[in-house]
Image (spheres, grey):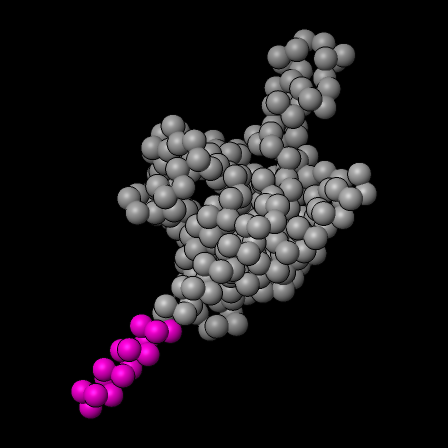
């Protein structure tokens, strides 16, 4: 029995080393080509994942949160500078109160844990920005947001935008109000001035949505442009991983190279 355990331990260590080598090889391969500056994620399918795996909705969202941390670390390691997440839409407030409360508690705990020691935030020097109609959130969520943003405000390595109580139409309407209030003349309302008053100014280079649903759900409509590809993945968000992201990046790199050749 002892000999079998020793062999199993050696095989486990060997397999772990092989997987680590493959992972590093994959990352190095992707980094040889161009990398998108700003990637936006619509993280859909947590509830569908829960149903398919016969777990609670809360467990489905918790699985999605674990997947998020892994994907953020790998995306930032690849060299992506800005990542934006659709965490909670204004439309989500129409869900049953129990579901909304579960999501808010998960959001609170995730925010408080995300910037601690030995996290991807510390590793990549990530500044976390939370945007949206934050005045609609409960005080305990606002406190977690304030603590997270304050703890990372001086970080310069990467940017993580977390969109909560957000829709693109509301963002655009807010930018129009801010622009009109600031310039005092309709003649000064331009594409550039509106962009300056958006929650997120950086244009999106790649939009990714999981769960196989083909719609934008009112996310970052202003920041998307004529060269923003929208990738819809059939997997639910908790199942989205390195291989899915790798295939998407390879397609993005080929598409970008074709655009540059066309120019």
Q: Which residues are magenta?
A: 1-15
Residue 196 in view in this figure: yes
As displayed, is residue 173 above or below residue 112? Answer: above
User: Residue at point 42% right, 38% down?
Assistant: 126
Instruction: Check the image and name the residue furthest to the top.
Output: 184
Residue 27 lies, in percent from the top left, at: 50, 55
Inspect the magenta stretch and tell me whether residue 114 lies in it. Answer: no
Question: Looking at the image, which residue sits at the far bottom?
Answer: 1
Up the image or down, 203 lies above or below 3; here it is: above
Q: Residue 5: which quarter of the image?
A: bottom left
Horizontal side of 87 relative to 176 (left or right) equals left
Q: Quadrant of the C terminus?
A: top right
Could you say where residue 31 lies in the image, as x and y percent from the top left?
55, 50
Residue at (44% x, 35% y) in the render: 157
Residue found at the very far left of the displayed protein: 2
- Relative to residue 108, is residue 217 drawn left or right? right
Taking the spot 72% from the left edge, 38% from the top edge, the residue there is: 225
Q: Quadrant of residue 58?
A: bottom left
């Amino acid at each position: 029995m002892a000999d079998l355990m020793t062999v199993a331990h050696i095989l486990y260590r060997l397999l772990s080393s092989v997987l680590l080598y493959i992972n590093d090889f994959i990352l190095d391969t992707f980094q040889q080509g161009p990398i998108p500056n700003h990637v936006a994620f619509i993280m859909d399918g947590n509830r569908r994942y829960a149903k398919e795996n016969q777990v609670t909705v809360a467990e489905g969202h918790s699985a999605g949160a674990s997947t998020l941390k892994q994907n953020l670390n790998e995306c930032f390691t690849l060299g992506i500078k800005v990542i934006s997440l659709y965490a909670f839409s204004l439309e989500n407030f129409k869900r049953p109160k129990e579901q909304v409360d579960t999501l808010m508690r998960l959001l609170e705990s995730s925010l408080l844990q995300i910037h601690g020691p030995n996290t991807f935030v510390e590793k990549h020097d990530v500044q976390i920005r939370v945007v949206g109609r934050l005045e609609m959130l409960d005080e305990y969520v606002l406190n977690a947001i304030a603590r997270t943003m304050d703890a990372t405000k001086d970080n310069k390595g990467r940017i993580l935008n977390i969109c909560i109580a957000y829709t693109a139409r509301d963002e655009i309407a807010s930018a129009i109000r801010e622009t009109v209030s600031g310039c005092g003349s309709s003649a000064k309302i331009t594409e550039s001035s509106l962009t300056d008053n958006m929650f997120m100014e950086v244009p999106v280079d790649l939009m990714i949505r999981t769960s196989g649903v083909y719609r934008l759900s009112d996310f970052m409509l202003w920041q998307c442009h004529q060269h923003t590809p929208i990738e819809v993945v059939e997997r639910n968000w908790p199942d989205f991983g390195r291989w899915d992201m790798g295939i998407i990046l390879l397609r993005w790199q080929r598409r970008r190279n074709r655009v540059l050749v066309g120019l």
